[in-house]
Amino acid sequence: MTNTIADLKALAVTSSTTEVEVLGYHGVADGGGGLFAWRAGATATDDGGLWIESTGATGGLWQRIVDSAAPVSVRWW
């Protein structure tokens, strides 16, 4: 678990199946948090919301796990 997206970016990755709950985008409970999974080998572009590039690991990206039945939120960016 991490507090913000900045904390997620800095997190060291130890496994290709790592999942992390983020509590907020800029601050805890601001509506921008969610569940993220490390996708080793991913080549998507960091869009600041669904795909997050790591500064603490190389060779992949964090992908937001989205419930297909729920709407996308502007707070994710």
Image: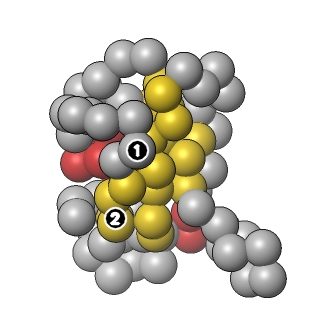
Q: Residue at x 29, y 23 (%)?
A: 57
Circle 2 sits in a helix, a strand or a loop, which is it?
A: strand
Q: Residue 23 in the image: x percent, y percent?
A: 31, 72
Q: Residue 6 in the image: x percent, y percent?
A: 29, 46
Relative to 6, 43 lies left or right: right
Q: Quadrant of the C terminus?
A: bottom right
Among all residues in the image, which is located at the extreme top? 59
Circle 1 sits in a helix, a strand or a loop, which is it?
A: loop
Badge 2: residue crowd in 10 Å (few <14, some 14–19, many ≥20): many
- Is 29 located above or below residue 47 in the figure? below
Q: Residue at x 44, y 16 (%)?
A: 59
Q: What's the residue type where badge 2 is placed?
A: Val
Rendered image: mark on residue 17:
1
Quarter of the view holding residue 12: top left
Q: Quadrant of the N terminus?
A: bottom left
Rendered image: mark on residue 22:
2
The reply to whether residue 54 is visible in this rendering is yes
Q: How many marks?
A: 2
Q: Residue 3 in the image: x percent, y percent?
A: 22, 64
- Is 11 located above or below residue 2 in the figure? above
Relative to 70, 23 lies left or right: left
- Is 39 located above or below residue 37 in the figure? above
Quarter of the view holding residue 25: bottom left
Q: What's the residue type where badge 1 is placed?
A: Thr
- Is 64 located above or below residue 45 in the figure? below
Q: Nearer the viewer, residue 73 or 13?
A: 13
